[in-house]
Amino acid sequence: MRLAVLCGLLLGLSYLPNLRWLAIVAAIVGGVEAVPSTFHTLRKRELDVEFLMLLSAVGSLLLDRPQESAVLMFLFSLSRALESFTLARTKNAIEALVALRPSTVVIRTPEGQKSIPVEEVAMGDLILVPPFQAFAVDGSVLEGEGSVDASALTGESRPVSVEVGSKVQAGVRNLDFGLVIKAESTVENSTLSKVISLVENAQQNKASGEKISGWFGSRYTWFVLLAAVLMLTVKLGLGVPFQQAAYASLTLLVALSPCALVISVPAATLSALAWAAKNGLLIRGGEYIERAGEIKTILLDKTGTLTRGRPVVTRVLTFGALVRDEAICAASSLESQSDHPVALAIIDEARKQGCMGVEPTEVQVVPGKGIRGNVQDSFVEVGQITMFPNTLPEGVGKAVKEAFERGESTTVLRVADRAGVEKGFAVICLEDELRSSAIANLAELRELGVTEISVLSGDSNGAVAAIAKRVGADRFFAETLPADKERIIAEANEKAPTMMVGDGVNDAPALARASVGVAMGGLGSDIAMNAADVVLMNDRLELIPTLIKLGRKTKAIVRANLIFGGVVIGVLTLGATLGILPLPVAVVGHEGSTIIVILNGLRLLGGVRSKQ
């Protein structure tokens, strides 16, 4: 950019009396960066747009038109500077991620605290993380509690609370008190490193339009050169003086040059990738941004995608003398030592109602069925209905069946005294918690023109049907295996471009088969990273509408750029062929259109608006 500005200043000064020679200096300054790359291209026996521009500039100098040469080099260097700025913004996304990682950490050893480079952190190391420092590796909190800032890594704007046992990721910043974490990765295989690698690869993975424009730029250059030579030959054959014929030939060469067309796609897609990386969308490349803009059918996995993948208590039905609060408190006490998802849901529900719980005694696990033991002066059993083959009162079996039809899972509770006299039964109904934004997000997809939304799951028919109805899906597929999901996606792809959204593990075949595979909950998962085309960081379902809007906006800008660039080339070429287009006008039209195309692509650095 400094060279471009210097070139412009020298060009302006060259119009002063007796300073016309500064135009030659301006042309040299404007072309100094293009010469090495053009020489390298010529050594490979290839031609590119830079060669055409330098040829035009040298030709203008030889025809004693230094100011026209300087105008060409000024506008050309300015467009190169803007192109470099676009590339730099995408590189900044990587540099910002790298900057999240501290260079050294303090670990706790038997000999005391020790500061080491982050590259030396090993699995299992105990790392002390002071306030306002980022975690160097993935791990779990061993000591302390507080909140962390994950915005730079996941786009999550609000601080996230952490406590003992919470998982933390490399690149996330500690906000409050000092924490001690146990390293569960090294620097090389941390979440942050995987994200950096994915962003780097995305910038190398070109969109199909970019590949076409690159091919067009290299092949079309030969056509431009031959057309200019043909123009020179025809003019000379018609008796036109050499200087005038050469001037017309250079004008045609500039008019036909495809700078605006070549930069149209990368200017847009690189800007879109840069914005996406900063806002929690890791996209493998421009190709998938293009595809996202074409999506008409979306299939979503249920567990871990539409739902949070953890059950919550929805209802408690009691029988006999047992009351709701007593039932939940007894069940949570018996389950207090378990980390089973159902047990954790019951314990959470008990905490909400203020039950402190007591430690059970004589606990016995019944494999595949449930658990039993003593809670104070009561004998308590919690488990599946099959755990109580002969003791169920009338109505319990019916309640379990009705819950199943509603899509709920159930746990049966029996409470008796130590002598075995029954006090009562309870049916605890649970349901996988729907993400709070799921209904609104799917409604927004409808507004965007997505014509079919389906839910896929290996869960039971009732559970999947209930979720599909709540979110307003058109269809659902229950009790599906990974191979079934892949087949369903393949069939959908034959009708329209299809997006699959899953958790990246059992959904991997379907993610790979879809036009665009989107991994939810895949941050840090190798399977998700490898199978999906897009990873939504921090499980943010609202990024799916954002992805589609970004794809459509990118396609619209690319289309506008290509049409605009093509029209400008057509008009300039017609004028040059008819001999009514001066070289300075051709230069301004050519390089001006290139700058406009780049600036239009840079609009994507502002991203798209989200309803969330």
Image (spheres, helix red, strand yellow):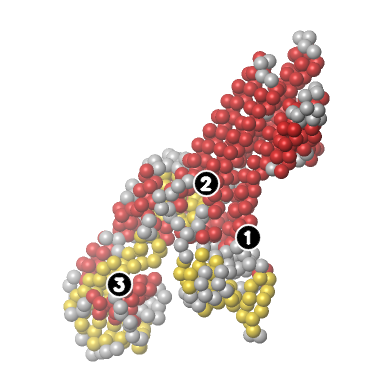
Residue that lies at the very extreme toward the top in this rendered image: 239
Contact? badges 2 and 1 (CB < 8 Å): no
Secondary-structure class at tag 2: helix
Residue in the foreground of this view, choosing between 568 and 399: 568
Three-letter code, disc 1 = Val
Q: Answer left or right for 73 relative to 592.
A: right
- Number of the front mark, 2 or 1: 2
Kindly tell me whether residue 527 is visible in this rendering: no
The residue singled out by tag 2 in the image is 606
| Mark 2 or 1, nearer chain start | 1
- N-term mark: 3 or 1: 1
> Which of the 4 image quarters holds residue 319?
bottom left
Give the labeled residue for mark 1: 98
Given residues 115 and 20, the one toward you in this image is: 20
**The N terminus appears in which quarter of the rendering?**
top right
Taking the image as shown, residue 197 lies to the left or right of residue 244, namely left
